[in-house]
Image (cartoon, rainbow, N blue to C red):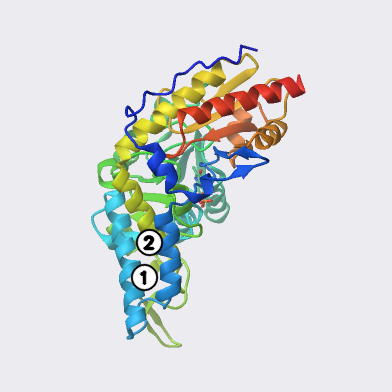
Amino acid sequence: MSGSGSVVEPPPPGSSPLDVDEIRAEFPALDQQVHGRDLVYLDNAATAHKPNRVIDAVREHDRATNANVHRGVHALSQRATDAFEEARDTTRAFLGAEDPEEIIWTRGTTEAINLVADAWARRELGPDDEIVLTELEHHSNIVPWQRVREETGARLRVVPIDDDGAVEMDALEDAVGPDTALVTLAHVSNALGTVNDVHAATEIAHDADALALVDGAQAVPHMDVDVQDIGCDFYAFSGHKVYGPTGIGALYGRRELLEEMQPYQAGGEMIRQVTFEETTYACLPAKFEAGTPNITGAVGLGHALDFVTDHGRDSIRAHEDRVLSAATERLAAIDEVEILGTAEDKASVLSFVIEDVHPHDVGTVLDREGVAIRAGHHCTQPVMDKFGVAATCRASFAMYNTVEETEALADAVREAIEIFH
Ligand code: PMP
């Protein structure tokens, strides 16, 4: 084990692209003690905390508006509809989409991917079709396609990752061919932090006349995303990982595709005309939004995205890169620590294991020190298999984390090693 001396100097005051003290003051949940220690929250890939702006917007909406959308002629319903649709337009702008009707509200990334699997793949694909995905996908970008395979006979092709945890782009190119109907991959891996070249993956898909779906759950909070620049057909993300509420997220879909697709769920809101003989469907985006949506969630998400935009996604990325490098450097200096995921382009996730110590035990010791990390397979069991482990410890960073907190992480890791070795 290396000495406990600091290996990374915090940046001199004023040199950070973000005023992190000011940002932290916006997040009330950060200001607490856990087991008598100042909370160091490094579980942002699972869910991020919410700034006052989001908490207040949600409370205010519930307190003073709280009406159903699209159906009322009264003032509160109109106000709710305006706020709900404004949030959709904020999401459109945040993703660089052209048209708010290309933004479909969902419960999150999982439901967005299931929507595409159900409303497009299950109906369009057959035994001659292939879906290409990668070894680093979250289970929510694997299991829906396995169900499509069961129901349609379509085949899955899995593109391997290399020992650094980077997708082998040559293998991706080889895997895509005339039978490929869809290429689907994460923009950023939640288990390893790898940033995938989704531009290139989309181009490879389109060259083969296949569609491209990007799981943006771990990208949207950390970097600029422009779906038109990427060129993808679908892009999915979750509100709660980008400082918004749980239970809300969105699917971006290219307009022509969404128009051709069948509805996802059926019920109120998604119809144009209903008789017992026949039902016709509403236009976009209502066609995919059956039932009363998560109105408060959408309003809160709109404020969360504005919060991120106001601070600047390039500045957030630059700050988080600095925190990630500091954490990486500190943990790499500890002999018993092995870092998994060493791709050149990474964002905000640091996965590691400690020789002979179960990640859950590490997580428990860190928790006693006030440091919240995640220990487990991170819903990426194929990644665990690739690295020959059952689980990892994962520290994941947000715009409010500091270089100093990476020192607390390293100190707590050393404490765990001392206890278990
Ligand atoms: N994809 C990735 C890469 C994720 O990190 C997650 C959440 N861990 C999901 C999909 C699923 O997101 P949600 O649970 O919010 O639907």
Q: Nearer the viewer, residue 66 or 22?
A: 22
Residue wearing tag 1: 286
Q: Nearer the viewer, residue 59 or 343?
A: 59
Badge 1 or badge 2: first in the primary sequence: 2
Give the residue displayed 47% in from the left and 55% down from the top.
108
Residue furthest bottom as drawn: 276
Q: On the rendered structure, is 65 left or right of 4?
A: left
Instruction: Place residue 387 in its image quadrant.
Output: top right
Residue furthest right as drawn: 420
Q: Residue 15 at what x, y percent from top left?
A: 32, 27
Give the residue displayed 53% in from the left and 20% down from the top.
330
What's the amino acid at mark 1?
Answer: Ala
**Residue 283, relative to residue 330: is it above or below?**
below
Q: Residue 98 at what x, y percent from top left?
A: 23, 55
Image quarter hosting the C terminus = top right
Q: Which mark is residue 139?
A: none
Image quarter hosting the N terminus = top right
What's the amino acid at mark 2?
Answer: Ile
Badge 1 density bin: few <14, some 14–19, many ≥20, Cα 10 Å:
many
Residue wearing tag 2: 104
Instruction: Place residue 270 in its image quadrant.
Output: bottom left
Q: Is mark 2 within 8 Å of ligand 1?
A: no
**Mark 1: secondary structure:** helix
**Mark 2: secondary structure:** strand
Badge 2 density bin: few <14, some 14–19, many ≥20, Cα 10 Å:
many
Q: Residue 19 at what x, y percent from top left?
A: 35, 37
**Residue 225, relative to residue 356: is it above or below?**
below
Q: Residue 376 at what x, y percent from top left?
A: 65, 37
Cβ–Cβ below 8 Å for labels 1 and 2? no
